[in-house]
Amino acid sequence: MKLFLYALTLITLSVGCNKKEEQTKTYLPRILTKNEGFNRYPEQKSDSLTIYNVVNSSPQQFSVKFRDTTVSIQTDPSDKNKSSDKFTSAQFINTQKTCLLVQLADSTGLVAPSYLISLKGKGLEVVSLYRASNGSQDQKFTTGINRVGAAGYLVDNDFFITNVNAKAYLIKRQNASERIQGQFLLMSPDRQTAVFLVQKSLYQVHYPSAEVSTEVLKGDVPQDIPGVYAWIQNNYSFQKNKKSISFLKYNDDDRIVDIKEFK
């Protein structure tokens, strides 16, 4: 009788473990290496992504489910045992709610890694937003996910993720081996050119085309970021080149600047 009860207990535990394993699936992320769109449509109504608050987490953390299965991300490509299913940030980036921009609850590196979780066919794919960098000021300018108004999100000065239609762009670097070593300042009026303050110059990236422009700052430039921003408003304006791409240029004496360009 005892042997029977022991066997029954083992069977119950085994079924319980299998059920738990079925509720979580771990995904090995691929790396984003080119501009891509993730505005995908579900093939059936049950193909849904849902964000949940993690109970009693402080600071607030989130989990993500696809259908009724919790999404876990393998954080080390060579080790299946290293994974995480908790996020400090999770937001939909398309109206279909089939693509999420997330940041892991992980403090082992310069900043917690960021990913896209996107519907693909009848399943999911996870895309890593990481590019290796050896910049001397990486610690200062690796800041994770930053909201840029209604335009989208800047990730670690290396990626721009548009809101609403879930497009992911690689930000062209000044030096291939390091992420942009500068402070993001503002976007152009058409929300397609990102402007960074890099030492005494403005490094500007039109992220859809990867065309860039570097404008050396002229005159007595303030030392603080708010001061620099105001100084640029008074001395520079966005001007379109022959390709209709907007870059900041130093004003000539006759040009009237519309302050709306900087809003």
Image (cartoon, rainbow, N blue to C red):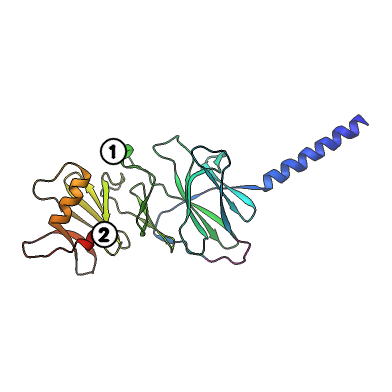
Q: Where residue 174 sits: x, y (%)?
A: 25, 49
Q: Which residues are magenta?
A: 41-47
Residue 77 visible in image: no
Nearer to me, 81 or 262: 262
Q: Is residue 44 magenta?
A: yes
From the viewer's perspective, is 36 left or right of 28?
left
Where residue 82 appears, as percent x and y from the top left, is 55, 38
Q: How many marks?
A: 2
Relative to 30, does residue 210 appear above or below in the rendering? below
**Contact check, label 2 and label 1, Cβ < 8 Å:** no
Q: Secondary structure at mark 2?
A: loop
Question: Image check: 83 left or right of 143?
Answer: right
From mark 2 to mark 1, how far is it between C-alphas? 29 Å
Name the image quarter holding the C terminus: bottom left
> Identity of the amino acid at label 2?
Lys
Judge the density around disc 1: few (<14), some (14-19), many (≥20) Cα neighbours within 10 Å: few
In magenta segment, residue 181: no
Whether 39 is drawn above or below 143: the answer is below
Q: Extreme top residue here? A: 2
| Dominant secondary-structure state across the stretch colored magenta | loop
Name the residue that disc number 2 marks: 263
Residue located at (29% from left, 50% from top):
173
What amino acid does circle 1 point to? Gln
Residue at 59 percent across and 52 percent down: it is 65
Using the rendered view, name the quadrant where residue 207 is placed: bottom left
